[in-house]
């Protein structure tokens, strides 16, 4: 009887041990699978975030390039060089005023980009716009004034044209410098993503 009881206890103990071992093994496998799944999800999310950041960066770079080009065109149209060319060529007022309207359209395009994406540049763009209006107003005065019959009036208008031109180009340079800095920062962020290092 004692032997049978001992055998029974041994069988029960072995069964319990097997059950415990199976439970531990099952828990371990479940835990490993969960960790693996969480890691896969984390990697997937990281890739999605990186892809989104790359897409957003590409979009912002395009906006910065567009703004830089618009400002370069504005700087030229409001430059001393352009003023002298127009004055020497005897540009007709209708053609001049059409170019002024084109300049206003470019300013509106720059304002739209700045207002929606770079409000910190609004003050500088407003300065540029004010000075371009001064430039075109005084440049029209230059074109309408006969340098031979009214040299003082012509010189006064030309002097104010040059002052406005200087201010336009100074402020354009300031904004374009900030654009370059932002563009460089995006380039560094993209390089960090390519290398798999955190950007923030």
Image (cartoon, helix red, strand yellow):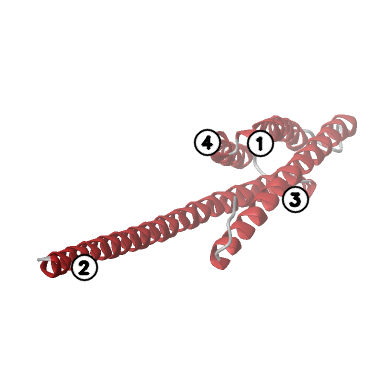
Give the Cα separation between the discs numbered 2 and 1: 78 Å
Mark 3 Cα within 10 Å, few/some/many (few <14, many 20+)? Answer: few
In this figure, which residue is indicated by the disc labeled 4?
116
In this orientation, which residue lies closer to the viewer: 83 or 111? 111
Q: Earlier in the sequence, mark 1 or mark 4?
A: 4
Seen in the picture, residue 130 relative to 1 is either above or below; the reply is above
Give the Cα separation between the discs numbered 2 and 3: 103 Å
Circle 2 SS class: helix
Residue 17 pos. (x, y %): 25, 64
In this figure, which residue is indicated by the disc labeled 2?
14
In this figure, which residue is indicated by the disc labeled 3?
85
In this figure, which residue is indicated by the disc labeled 1?
121
Q: Disc 2 vs disc 1: which is toward the camera?
A: 2
- Report whether 185 appears left or right of 145: left
Q: Quadrant of residue 172?
A: top right
Circle 1 SS class: helix
Residue 164 pos. (x, y %): 79, 35
Residue 114 pos. (x, y %): 58, 38
Mark 4 Cα within 10 Å, few/some/many (few <14, many 20+)? Answer: few
Q: Are marks 1 and 4 in contact (CB under 8 Å)?
A: no
Q: Earlier in the sequence, mark 2 or mark 3?
A: 2
Q: Name which residue lies at 65% across and 41% down.
A: 92
Circle 3 SS class: helix
Q: Quadrant of residue 190?
A: bottom right
Mark 1 Cα within 10 Å, few/some/many (few <14, many 20+)? Answer: some
Mark 2 Cα within 10 Å, few/some/many (few <14, many 20+)? Answer: few
- Residue sitting at the far right: 152
């Amino acid at each position: 009887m004692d032997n049978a009881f001992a055998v029974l206890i041994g069988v029960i103990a072995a069964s319990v041990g097997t059950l415990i071992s199976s439970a531990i093994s099952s828990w371990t496998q479940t835990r490993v699978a969960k960790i693996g799944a969480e890691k896969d999800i984390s990697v997937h999310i990281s890739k999605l975030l990186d892809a989104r950041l790359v897409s957003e960066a590409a979009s912002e770079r395009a906006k910065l390039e567009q703004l830089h080009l618009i400002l370069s065109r504005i700087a030229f149209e409001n430059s001393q060089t352009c003023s002298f060319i127009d004055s020497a060529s005897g540009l007709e007022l209708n053609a001049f005023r059409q170019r002024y309207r084109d300049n206003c359209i470019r300013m509106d395009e720059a304002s739209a980009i700045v207002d929606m994406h770079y409000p910190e540049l609004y003050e500088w763009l407003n300065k540029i716009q004010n000075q371009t209006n001064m430039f075109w107003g005084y440049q029209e005065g230059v074109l309408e004034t006969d340098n031979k019959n009214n040299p003082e009036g012509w010189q006064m208008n030309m002097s104010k044209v040059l002052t406005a031109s200087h201010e336009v180009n100074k402020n354009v340079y300031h904004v374009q410098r900030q654009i370059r800095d932002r563009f460089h920062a995006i380039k560094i962020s993209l390089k960090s993503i390519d290398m798999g290092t955190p950007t923030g």
